Amino acid sequence: MKQIAILIYLLAITSLQSCSAQVDKKNQAEELKLDSLINTLITKKGIPSIAIGIVKDDEVILAKGFGYANVEDKILANENTIYQLGSVTKMFTGHLLARLINNQKISISDTLANFFPDTMSFPKSPAGQVVTIKEIATHTSEFPRYPQNIQRIDPEPFKGYSVEEMLKGIEMVTIDTIISTRYNYSNFGYGVLGTAMENRMERSLNMLMNENIFDPYNMSNTSLLYKEDFNITLATPYLEVSPYKRTEPWDMGTLSGAGNIYSNITDLNKFMIELLQDTPINRIQQTKQFKINDTWNYGLGCFIVESKKRNTQIIYHGGDIDGYASSLSLYPEYNLGFVILTNWGEGQVIGDAFNQITNEIVKHYLGEITE
């Protein structure tokens, strides 16, 4: 996952000046006028499809698809089209962790070794520090982006990663610095986090997601694992244009907590409304756990971005796997959330498209861009 949207599209929105927009919610979708912008992006850039959802003040403002979920068969995208989310999955994994912490099933200070067999050898820093759940969840564990024993070669789709491979991969990690002092994004770490929660709760991550998130939030079209009935509504992933080059969804195996979730705009709107509530679980997840720089922080499965010019916080994660890209943004102060999905994996082009869509939404709700 290349995280194409993280630093690209937020560069613009963090420079917006605060301005309260008083808009009748019934007319917000019409006034926003995203149709023209998105259709132009699809036509000019060759993007197969873009789907977008917007929620404001606990109501769904927009749920819509544009372009083709399948180019060859001319199947149109809509609000029910399924996309694989890539690293936006981490927002769900972090939300599950926050729930387990709130329920006192896990402590953020638990050492990683407590979740795995006693026979394993776990990495330590030169000073003898051990990795905890907090470091794994905040990308400060010094675990690599991907495990050393991964077999995949870019741009091949993931074909699984077994428990045995994960345990071996953990033992292969070497740490040459003080733990919890620098941010080092790790998909491997989030796969390990998902497996740790499985081991503690003695339930599969898929079951934990269903029982703690998808079912209570009525997200009936969302799953950690691929389901056969997705065949009807799954957007075909593409890598290139002229002609389009089809690829396959990823099967990340035990790394699924890092990027495997499938969902659609209808369900993600529900998820955003839940994330915008003032609840103990959301407060745990959206608390700053590690400061990356003056603007960016990391919570549990989410970036927490401080926009100094607008004096507001943005809760965000992006995702980018071969053939799919996504971004999910929350503005708690404004009770605003929006999500953008696509079935195309051209990183820079998609980053620019997401940037333009994001600017339009934020400008509409928070005011014009000012220097």
Image (cartoon, rainbow, N blue to C red):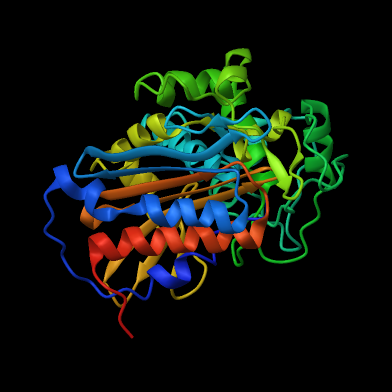
- The location of residue 351, given as percent across then percent down, is 57, 60
> Does residue 225 lie above or below 178 as drawn?
above
Q: Residue at x 67, y 46 (%)?
A: 187
Q: Classify residue 51 as left or right of residue 126.
A: left
Horizontal side of residue 357 vs 235, given as left or right: left
Residue 22: quadrant of the picture:
bottom left
Residue closer to the observer: 33 or 135: 33
Relative to 109, residue 227 above or below: above
Q: Is residue 248 left or right of residue 332?
A: right
Q: Residue at 35% of width from left, 21% of height from top?
A: 218
Q: Residue 22 or 31: which is nearer the viewer?
A: 31
For the question of whether residue 6 can be seen, the reply is: no
Between 215 and 58, the residue placed more toward the observer is 58
Residue placed at 64% from the left, 56% from the top? Answer: 185
Position of 245 compared to 31: left or right? right
Position of residue 85 relative to residue 234, above or below, is below
Image mark count: 0
* Percent of width and height locating residue 338: 36, 48
Q: Residue furthest bottom?
A: 371
Q: Is residue 215 visible?
A: yes
Residue nearer the viewer, 326 or 210: 326
* Residue 333 position in % (x across, y down): 22, 57
Q: Quadrant of residue 15?
A: bottom left
Give the percent coordinates (x, y) of residue 346: 68, 54
Q: In the rendered image, which quarter contains the C terminus?
A: bottom left
